[in-house]
């Protein structure tokens, strides 16, 4: 073990304890107190300056950081924004995202402090990019690796992680975080089951925001000659918000700090901004319903909420109008920046982060079929078929098989098999649709002993499902069925917190085919 100064804080996440700790437990950081008391920092400091000015590196990890910045031209001009908008291109890091910075730091600190050594198993909960960075560094340094992530995260991220030799454990989208199959619960369970394992826990690790406090913030200032009038960024684990925000509060207090947060997340302040009936958002890597200790919400001047419907088409625009092949949260960042920067003048500078690239989303917003199915762009009738713009109400659809969230998996499986159906709509007691469940998923969960036959259907429900109404066009139904093999038709009553979406039908590909063939004949 390298020399560790006696006053240096050695952080071990509570996730490594035998007893489970609820996510979001506060960690007592004395940063604000230190602004007036000038108490010394208990953390080590990392140098941000480029060690290899000719860009010839001794290894891959030396390439992390010192990312380029590019000015956006066409989109700000079309939006009538007068100031300069610069984007920091974090997707050029070796692992493809901003998370490389943080993972490199916490790895190096943990090794230097004697907390980990090659041969151990590193377990980490992630929305994908941290998982890729952890898997990459584990592969280089000789560690085993298990990444725990939500089922909503793209298959591309899982493919990269497993190709690096790591394993992936998926968790249901709406599973309670502390449940055995929730992100934190699953990671903690694995930590107790696997000897010689360790969890960094990016959601509570001080090295997460410190990475950006020590490096990213100072890079931005250097690149723009200390002329930064506004920064607009979102929070996933909160590292960039907290780290960059705190450094700018110290060295550039005039800079406006603006946070953006997806509708459905709980990060924005004041809390009234988060009031919504939205329970799911597609954007990956930003926003959660529990505020992690690494996120200092109050360091922002104000917050802006963004929607999938705004952000995902903006990702497409960044590709087509700026030539930037970037990921989901980059679209949300620019949507928020265009709103926030309206108050800036010509010559002033606004900065956004581009955290990752399109590599992780080829089957999501990069795909026209996916965008059509999700309703984020108009369904174009490319082949000019006569039935495309007909209404769902024009065809004869099937009555959905319905199970309750509290029904047992055994009861649901017996019902599906007796009715010779593969899937059923899952509803709450008030008949509100929450998702679907199918035979293969139930069987796999029981066979893998992840769930028991007596467990409620709610534990096995897929909540990622595009929904149709009677007024939806058949073209969109077709797009959904291309991916999911069926589409649920709903009827909506009430609004806000009283909104109920009742399943009234299910459409299969053969239903559209039979309608088209019969009418055509």
Image: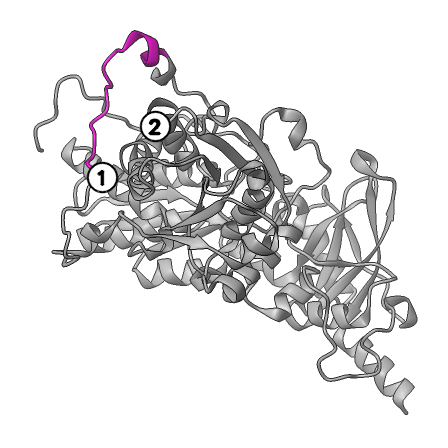
Q: Rate crowding at label 2 as few (under 14), some (14 to 19) or many (20 or more) other CA atoms within 10 Å.
A: some
Give the quarter of the figure containing the N terminus.
Answer: top left
User: Residue at (34%, 22%) from the top-left corner?
Assistant: 250
Tag shown at residue 247: 2
Q: Considering only vertical position in the picture, is 259 above or below 281?
A: above
- Which callout, 1 or 2, points at the residue further toward the start of the chain? 1
Q: Mainly helix, strand or loop, the magenta region?
A: loop
The answer to if 307 sits in the magenta stretch is no
Q: CA distance from mark 1 to mark 2?
A: 13 Å
Q: Considering only vertical position in the picture, is 17 above or below 452?
A: above
Instruction: Please state the extent of the stretch shown in magenta in the rendering.
Output: 33-47
Residue beneath disc 1: 48
Which sits in the foreground, 278 or 464?
Answer: 278
Label 2: element kind: helix
Which residue is outermost to the front? Answer: 346
Res. 208 in view: yes
Q: Quadrant of residue 514?
A: bottom right
User: Residue at (38%, 15%) from the top-left corner?
Assistant: 32
The answer to if 35 sits in the magenta stretch is yes
Residue 161 at x, y percent in the picture: 36, 58
Residue 512 at x, y percent in the picture: 81, 77
Residue 3 at x, y percent in the picture: 8, 28
- The image shows a total of numbered marks equal to 2
Which sits in the foreground, 471 or 163?
Answer: 471
Label 1: element kind: loop
């Amino acid at each position: 073990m390298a020399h560790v100064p006696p006053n240096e804080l050695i952080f071990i996440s509570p996730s490594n304890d035998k007893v489970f700790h609820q996510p979001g437990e506060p960690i007592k950081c004395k940063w604000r107190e230190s602004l007036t008391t000038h108490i010394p920092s208990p953390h080590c400091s990392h140098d941000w300056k480029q060690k290899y000015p000719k860009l010839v590196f001794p290894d891959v990890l030396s390439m992390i950081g010192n990312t380029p910045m590019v000015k956006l031209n066409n989109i700000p001009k079309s939006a009538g924004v007068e100031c300069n908008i610069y984007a920091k291109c974090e997707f050029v890091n070796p692992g493809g995202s901003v998370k490389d910075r943080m993972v490199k730091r916490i790895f190096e600190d943990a090794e230097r402090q004697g907390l980990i050594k090659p041969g151990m198993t590193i377990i980490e909960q992630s929305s994908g990019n941290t998982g890729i960075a952890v898997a990459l560094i584990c592969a280089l340094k000789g560690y085993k690796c298990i990444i725990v992530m939500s089922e909503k995260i793209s298959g591309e991220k899982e493919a990269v992680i497993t190709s690096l030799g790591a394993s992936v454990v998926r968790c249901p989208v709406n599973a309670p975080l502390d449940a055995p199959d929730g992100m934190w619960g699953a990671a903690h369970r694995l930590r107790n089951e696997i000897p010689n394992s360790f969890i960094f826990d990016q959601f509570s690790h001080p090295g997460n925001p410190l990475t950006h406090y020590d490096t990213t913030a100072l890079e931005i200032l250097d690149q723009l000659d200390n002329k930064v009038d506004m920064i607009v960024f979102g929070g996933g684990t909160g590292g960039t918000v907290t780290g960059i925000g705190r450094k700018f509060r110290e060295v550039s207090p005039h800079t406006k700090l603006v946070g953006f947060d997806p509708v459905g997340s709980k990060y924005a302040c004041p809390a009234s901004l988060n009031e919504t009936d939205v329970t799911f958002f597609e954007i990956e890597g930003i926003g959660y319903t529990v505020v992690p200790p690494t996120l200092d919400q109050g360091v922002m001047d104000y917050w802006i909420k963004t929607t999938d419907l705004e952000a995902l088409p903006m990702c497409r625009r960044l590709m087509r109008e700026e030539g930037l092949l970037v990921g989901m949260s980059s679209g949300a960042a620019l949507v928020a920046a265009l709103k926030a920067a309206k108050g800036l003048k010509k010559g002033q500078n606004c900065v956004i982060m581009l955290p990752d690239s399109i590599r992780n989303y080829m089957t999501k917003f990069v795909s026209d079929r996916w965008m059509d199915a999700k309703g984020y762009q108009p369904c174009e009738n490319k082949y000019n078929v006569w039935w495309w713009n007909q209404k769902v109400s024009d065809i004869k659809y099937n009555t959905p098989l319905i199970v309750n969230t509290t029904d047992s998996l055994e009861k649901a499986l017996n019902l599906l098999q007796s009715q010779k159906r593969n899937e059923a709509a899952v509803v709450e007691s008030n008949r509100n649709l929450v998702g679907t469940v199918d035979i293969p998923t139930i069987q796999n969960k029981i066979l893998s002993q992840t769930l028991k036959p007596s467990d409620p259907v709610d534990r096995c429900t897929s909540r990622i499902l595009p929904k149709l109404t009677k007024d939806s066009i058949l073209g969109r139904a077709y797009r959904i069925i291309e991916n999911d093999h069926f589409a649920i038709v709903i009827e909506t009553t009430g609004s806000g917190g009283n909104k109920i979406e009742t399943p009234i039908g299910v459409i299969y590909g053969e239903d559209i085919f039979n309608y088209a063939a019969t009418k055509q004949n």
